[in-house]
Image (cartoon, rainbow, N blue to C red):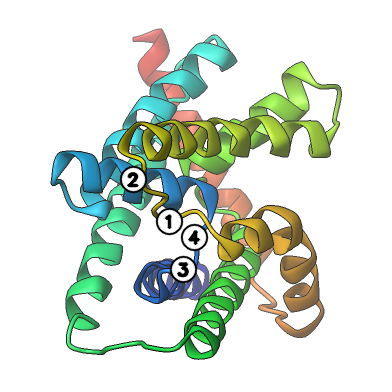
Amino acid sequence: MAKGLFWLCFSVLLNAFGNALTIKAAFGSAPWTAASINISYATGLTVGTVLVMMGSIVLIADDLLRRRWNGIKDIFNFLYMLSFGYLIDFWLFALQTFTISGWIVRIGVCVSGILCIAAALSIYFQVNLVLHPFDDLLKILREQYLHGNVVRAQRISLGIPLAIGLTISLFRHQFVGINLGTVISFLCMGYFILLFDHYIHLHINRDALTHWHRQHAFHRLKHSKA
């Protein structure tokens, strides 16, 4: 269990760092991050704050689509989302003195950030303790509404932030956060995750994780009957 928690914490740090690199490179970010950058520019809020706000809205939407509150899992998913959002702000603050110039360097930093995100997601999915609301949305759409069609689920779940980012960019007459990196993330992230799955093997004690899930499910059922 402790090993799973360690890798979960490591994955959120790596994921936030990768997103910060794509933002710093200014060559396009993953769709949800790109939408957050556009809202950040329009409102003056930090990218991490916007991600937390959007994640909270999606968390509620997930429960509405699921037609039930997800209990203790929602709380853990919220805490994961909160730490992820503000860790991006932390990394952006830590990297603010670094200057990235030249389009070749920017592309290199952007791709490095995307690969960091893919490695982090590979770890995160292997640990399988919590789900970010954005990922939970994809899972719900795939399993409950699209008969297991992951391609359509991904297009819909990622199409939402892309539409938000593009709409704000058109109104502001300035494209921010949407570029080559967005295209690479949208089209290739799944393949990158599979690549890291071949090289990253955590060997986590599944019995301990199963016990953890069952324990919290029991508490949720107990409270619901109270």
What amino acid type is highlighted by mark number 3? Asn
- Give the side of residue 176 with respect to residue 200, left or right: left
What's the mark number on residue 82?
none
Looking at the picture, tell me which residue is in the foreground, 134 or 165: 165
In the rendering, at what x and y percent does residue 217 appear?
51, 32
Q: Can you say whether 223 is above or below 28 in the image?
A: above
Q: Can you say whether 113 is above or below 31 in the image?
A: below
- Give the side of residue 38 with respect to residue 160, left or right: left
Tag 4 secondary structure: loop
Tag 1 secondary structure: loop
Q: Can you say whether 117 is above or below 47 in the image?
A: below
**Mark in the foreground, 1 or 4:** 1
Tag 2 secondary structure: helix
Looking at the picture, tell me which residue is in the foreground, 226 or 9: 9
Residue with the mark numbered 1: 177
Q: Earlier in the sequence, mark 1 or mark 4?
A: 4
CA separation in Å, label 2 and label 1: 7 Å
Residue with the mark numbered 2: 38
What amino acid type is highlighted by mark number 4? Ser
Quarter residue 173 falls in: top left
What's the mark number on residue 29?
4
Q: Earlier in the sequence, mark 4 or mark 2?
A: 4
Quarter residue 21 falls in: bottom left
Tell me if label 2 and label 1 are in contact, CB under 8 Å.
yes
What amino acid type is highlighted by mark number 1? Gly
Neighbourhood count class around disc 4 (C-alpha, 10 Å): few under 14, some 14–19, many 20 upward:
many
Tell me if label 1 and label 4 are in contact, CB under 8 Å.
yes
What's the mark number on residue 15?
3
Q: Can you say whether 185 is above or below 108 in the image?
A: above
In the rendered image, the quadrant that contains the C terminus is top left
Q: Earlier in the sequence, mark 4 or mark 3?
A: 3
CA separation in Å, label 1 and label 4: 6 Å
